[in-house]
Image (cartoon, coloured by chain):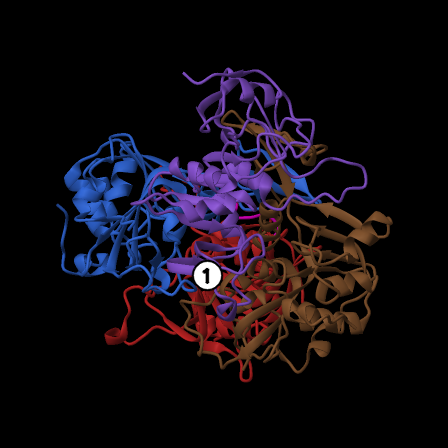
Chain colours: A purple, B red, C brown, D blue
Amino acid sequence: MSTGWTREQMAARAAQDIPNGSYVNLGIGIPELVARFVPEGREFIYHTENGMLGMGPPPAEEERDLDLMNAGKKYVTAVPGAAYFHHADSFSMIRGGHIDVCVLGTMQVAANGDIANWSTGAPGAIPAVGGAMDLVQGVKKIYVITQHTTKTGEAKLVERCSYPLTGPGVVSRIYTDLAVVDVTADGFKVVELAPGISFAEVEQKTGTKILPPE
Amino acid sequence: MSTGWTREQMAARAAQDIPNGSYVNLGIGIPELVARFVPEGREFIYHTENGMLGMGPPPAEEERDLDLMNAGKKYVTAVPGAAYFHHADSFSMIRGGHIDVCVLGTMQVAANGDIANWSTGAPGAIPAVGGAMDLVQGVKKIYVITQHTTKTGEAKLVERCSYPLTGPGVVSRIYTDLAVVDVTADGFKVVELAPGISFAEVEQKTGTKILPPE
Amino acid sequence: MINKQYSSVSAAITDIPDGATVMIGGFGASGSPIELIHALIDHGAKDLTVINNNTGNGEVGLAALIGNRQVRKMICSFPRSSQSKVFPELYQAGKIELELVPQGTLAERIRAAGAGIPAFYTPTTVGTVLAEGKESREFDGREYVMEAWLPADFALVKCEIADPLGNLVYNKTARNFNPLMCMAATTTIVQTKRLVAAGDIDPEVVITPGIFVNRVVEVPKPVHEDTLIAAGRSYP
Amino acid sequence: MINKQYSSVSAAITDIPDGATVMIGGFGASGSPIELIHALIDHGAKDLTVINNNTGNGEVGLAALIGNRQVRKMICSFPRSSQSKVFPELYQAGKIELELVPQGTLAERIRAAGAGIPAFYTPTTVGTVLAEGKESREFDGREYVMEAWLPADFALVKCEIADPLGNLVYNKTARNFNPLMCMAATTTIVQTKRLVAAGDIDPEVVITPGIFVNRVVEVPKPVHEDTLIAAGRSYP
């Protein structure tokens, strides 16, 4: 029985598309896993919004530095060649187009590249945006890693986002458990299917028109 | 025969008006002399636009560091507690209102506080403004040190500047060889005469109405 | 000798009045000036507008200040926390205001206030509900929104090493918003782990030059939010 | 391992085309990347727009580049120098253009380009001839002018210590415009007095993080403009 890609496989597949030497910002959740699957012979430099380039893996618990955390407020380490800076410099890197790739999770992504990943817009919900709107507007390439559908089976790849946007027309490519999907001028287009997954299944689980792989 | 204050005495008189602990930016020329006349018991911290707080006196020639100069491109030293920073941070200090006092030379100063000290506006002259326009708009108090008249006897304290302005309505107080003059809502007002100088002489050498000391 | 040192956190914050706008440094627990915040709780100033990236953790520090009902309005980018219910409960009960500002815009608005820049344009929020009601404008064919500077009356800041002139050095990612807030407040109050003599900090490595700092108080063994929370502590 | 090192100044600048906009770091002689500028003279690219605070000294470095008629336009705050007649003579003969920008506005426009801010408001130049033709606007009852970002194709920068990732440290007031120009150019080319291994620069003291740097070339004994001028040298 085919089940598509695991979270790890989605992350590994995304990592394949990131060139050597890229400056990369990874969102919370599955995107964080990308750092575990850097292809042989490549090196990425990780940026974290709260003021570091050269973020390394989490430390052993006894080696934690309480003053060294990432944007997800998890303890991390610094690799040789790291640098610390304040928030205005950090977001200059983001907004100024200096970061090559940002990999984000999402709630919805639309055929025109719109992304909605910060709020359901439900009444009474506490809005919290963090750095998401800066990232989607500033980083050169926005990649999304997400399950193809919600837990209840609703499409996350949709014609138009129903949730409030994080940013319009910013997503380049989507890595789901079922496929790698590009956002093109003609809308969604599958560029690769997960092993054992049919285009028909992807088409059926996508909320709008999607083009088959060539 | 009375000749009014010397350059050094003008600078010393200006220094008297600067409170202890002030952050001070000194223009090129007579203003630079202020640093030699800091009153007993006071300490000023000098800012130089090209990126240092805590500028110290010029070094002996053999102790020059070619990478340590001031905004006038003269070699200087750093005092204990100094800090280096880049130009955007340096002008944030200026424009953001963090510098307490700036002492400038001038070509003209007007009864409404206008200052003209960057260009004669003559055709063919090469305009050069440096940081003067930032300083006059950003520093909390702008003091001017100048001879009361030009070498050819023309008034430098005038009703309206004929030269292009550096900034409008920015000057608080003027130290000349003849008097200390405030810019008030009623125009120029003498607050102190140099020893042996009469108000009549000051009035005669000023290009517009000037009020006597109280 | 110029000396900005204060003898205690309470002496350093005692003139913060009701209704003041107060910036508080830190990103989550990292770089948060807990001792100054707790002194502000003891002091009791009310009706504050507080600027911080978050809304505090557990029931200590900023969360405790909010819980003590001293804060009328929060200006922040991320008011949710997995470790605190203080802000969410007050917010949902309509008892505290929120101005939500994207993190990069928050940082840049604070810097702008310190740098004498009353407004600037940014691509952030374009095409989203957070741009609604904001002026927008095209430059080189792309749309941007105008954002205003964000000054404050006071800033509470934490650093690693300070000298009596107020030159500051931070520790790792505890730097975050702290240097920007030093620039943007009328009165900047700093707690430092270590106070050294003027000249002991290399002028090349100063992150916050003393011109941006008004008061320095040494807190040699600052507590850390995460440690307090792990120990189940609350304040007061 | 990521390595941005180039073997020579000429290799590092060889793709600068005619018509490029080139930022050149330094304030007067301090922090001026003389070896990179001289390589650009050897290279011969013409019709350049050059951004620097000044217009060079004597007949070396930037003054020599201008004297060699490679510069169509200077963008600077202070084009006069007691030590050079190169720019004044060409300017008065109508052979070079000048955009005069106040020093603080120049710095902020360069930073804005690096920070993704297309425009901002500043009080500088309000009420002067330099504000003529510029949009102005009131905030909180005070007038400000709008200024646009100032990006460039290339930046030529000098630093004291660099690593192969492009992390940079400067020396004293030779820092000046250099870190800002690193942020604002599409391609940033750095000459460093000393190249060290990644990890040899403390992450706390990095002034320019490597993300802003594309190429690094070691120039172990850089000449200094003042020394060349004192020796009566000219280039080429």
Q: Residue under circle 1? A: A77
Chain for mark 1?
A
Residue beneath the point at 56% across and 69% down: C159
In the picture, measured across the screen, residue D62 lies left or right of residue B212, that is: left
Up-down relation of residue B197 to residue D84 (above or below): below
How far across and how far down the image is residue D147, in percent?
A: 52, 38
How far across and how far down the image is residue A108, in percent?
A: 62, 30
In the picture, measured across the screen, residue D159 lies left or right of residue A147, that is: left
Question: Magenta stretch containing residue B167, yes or no?
Answer: yes
If the image is split into quadrants, where does the N terminus of chain C sit?
A: bottom right
In the picture, measured across the screen, residue A18 lies left or right of residue D159, that is: right
Q: Which residues are magenta?
A: B164-169
How far across and how far down the image is residue D22, in percent?
A: 31, 39
Q: Given the image, on which type of amino acid does mark 1 rest?
A: Thr
What secondary structure predominates along the stretch shown in magenta?
Answer: loop
Whether residue B144 is visible to the viewer of this picture, yes or no, is no
Say which of D220 and B158 sits in front.
D220
Q: How many numbered marks appear? A: 1
If the image is split into quadrants, where does the C terminus of chain C sit?
A: bottom right
Q: Quadrant of residue A122?
A: top right
Q: Within 10 Å of the Cα at label 1, are there few (<14), some (14-19), or many (20+) other Cα atoms?
A: some
Say which of A39 and B196 sits in front.
A39
Whether residue B31 is visible to the viewer of this picture, yes or no, is yes
Question: Magenta stretch containing residue A80, yes or no?
Answer: no
Up-down relation of residue D85 to residue C201 (above or below): above
